[in-house]
Image (tube, rainbow, N blue to C red):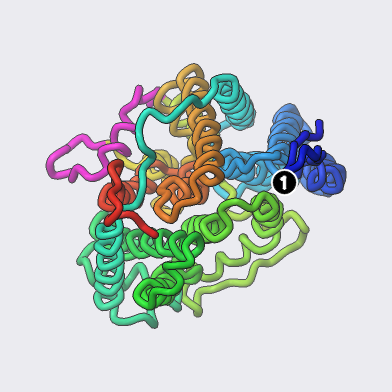
Amino acid sequence: MPGVRVGGGGRVAIEVPRRAVLSRPLSVPLIATVVGALPLAVAAQQGSGLRDATFWLQLVVAGYAGVRLCAMVLSGRRRLVQGAFWLFGYLAMGIAPLAQSVLGRDPTPVLGPREDTQLATALVLCGMIAFDVGALLARVRPLGRERRRPASVHRGRLWLLVLLGYAASGLLIVQLGGPAVFFTSRQELGLSLAEATGTPVDGEGGEAGSALLRGFGTVPALLALLFLTRWLVTSGEARRRPAVVLAWAGLLLLNAVVNNPISNPRYWFLTVLFALLFTVFPRSPVMYRAALALGLVVALLIFPFTDRFRYAEEERRPLETDSVLEPLVIKDYDQLNMFANTVTFAGDGHGHSYGEQLLGAALFFVPRGMWADKPEDTGFLVGGWMGTDSANLSSPLWAELWLDFGLLGMSLGFAGIGYLAARTDRRYVRRTLDDPSPGNVLAVVVPVLAGYGFILLRGSLLQASGRIGIALLCLALVTTFRPRPHTELR
């Protein structure tokens, strides 16, 4: 319904909601493509795969996730965290497994019977429905008034974070022998990290020492850049301060080195892009819709081909395509395969871990020397059982929760995640509309969380925990709940 606004002099103006203006021209082609045309086009391709119950269940998952993704794109509100969930769910758990089923090809070997893949697909659908139930419960409950002052950035501590970002990234660059190595490949960067920290390495990186050095070399610089970007975008006074502009420009160059897409995992670079985009355009529903829609196109057409940067130049192989579905059967989209292997792993006598894997991820910082029975990374655990030593096996959040807590625990876990995601999105919208101050912490944290959600959903949780811990330390450094006039960003 259009809104009525009474203006000066008693004049009445009819306000047409922006959602109606922007959504209707886009809704029909978007829904027709995402929900109908793309899944059906994939299903109609020629291949050696079986058209069995698993295939039809995967088609249902793709359709359900497609409907929810369209709802996120066409929503009158910006739902960053939920939008990231459904974008990942549609591509990695819907369209990609459907393509693999049609072609009869698995990017990662599936050791169990077809029934385990069918069960994994059904569990994926259960998790998605539970996520929706949690989000619905969050919408029913009003946000209410803030009981305390919202978190804001302390100006003096922000400059400490800027210095930390420069120092940590500079140390990483020096330790690895200069900026040039960051523009070679992830494999060569991993070898340099191993040499600098004295840890073993494979094609993806080293162990704890390498992860710690790289985490501190990338995360503080990114967060410092985002907070300064927010300050410059919302404050004309900051744009007139040479110190702020020069510090921001230096951090931009530094991030172009340490966080570039050549030597970093693509999911991490996706986090950087999402965070920067929504920090620069915090209140634009058009940019939000464009990001989700273009994210779908990029993931399907461009994302698989950037795998060439993983290896040294002499080891790079061109992606040979005999089918338009070929980019969807590469290792980037092995999430359902690994979930099926996790189901087989549990049924092979290992059973459920009842929170042990989650505890290991939460206490990632505890060294194994102090915790002899510390759980292994779930991807490594299942991969070792499979007989592979690959360091690039995913363990999607569905598999993590199911292995720990079974069907009921996984469903409750996704319901809780959906609830928190919806509440976070609502607070983000309210804070960015009602609190346009430069020091609004939530305006930076939520875009980072939305981007990093792709890494958390892909898994494994233990691999994703290191950067989360470093980010929390950086946020604790700059955040204050008692701002003073002399400490606020202006």
| Residue at image coords 38%, 26% | 350
| Residue at image coords 40%, 59% | 227
Would you say 448 lies left or right of 384 here? Answer: right
Q: Residues within 10 Å of mark 1 (few under 14, many from 20)?
A: many
Examine the rendering and report whether any part of residue 42 can be seen: no
| Residue at image coords 70%, 39% | 75
- Residue 327 at x, y percent in the picture: 67, 58
Q: Quadrant of residue 277?
A: bottom right
The question of residue 256 being in magenta is answered with no
Is 140 above or below relative to 146? above
Examine the rendering and report whether any part of residue 32 can be seen: yes
As drawn, the residue found furthest toward the top would be: 408
Which residues make up the magenta segment? 349-374
Who is closer to the viewer here, 241 or 25?
241
Quarter of the figure that contains the N terminus: top right
- Residue 129 at x, y percent in the picture: 62, 25
As drawn, the residue found furthest toward the front would be: 9
What secondary structure is marked by label 1?
helix
Dominant secondary structure of the residues highlighted in magenta in the image: loop
Quarter of the figure that contains the C terminus: bottom left
Q: Quadrant of residue 130?
A: top right
Who is closer to the viewer here, 382 or 353?
353
Who is closer to the viewer here, 71 or 217?
71
Would you say 173 lies left or right of 455 here? Answer: left
The question of residue 351 being in magenta is answered with yes
- Residue 369 at x, y percent in the picture: 13, 44
Three-letter amino acid code at disc 1?
Ala
Is 260 above or below relative to 65? below
Who is closer to the viewer here, 51 or 269?
269
Is 408 above or below relative to 393? above
| Residue at image coords 26%, 78% | 174
Residue occupied by mark 1 = 99
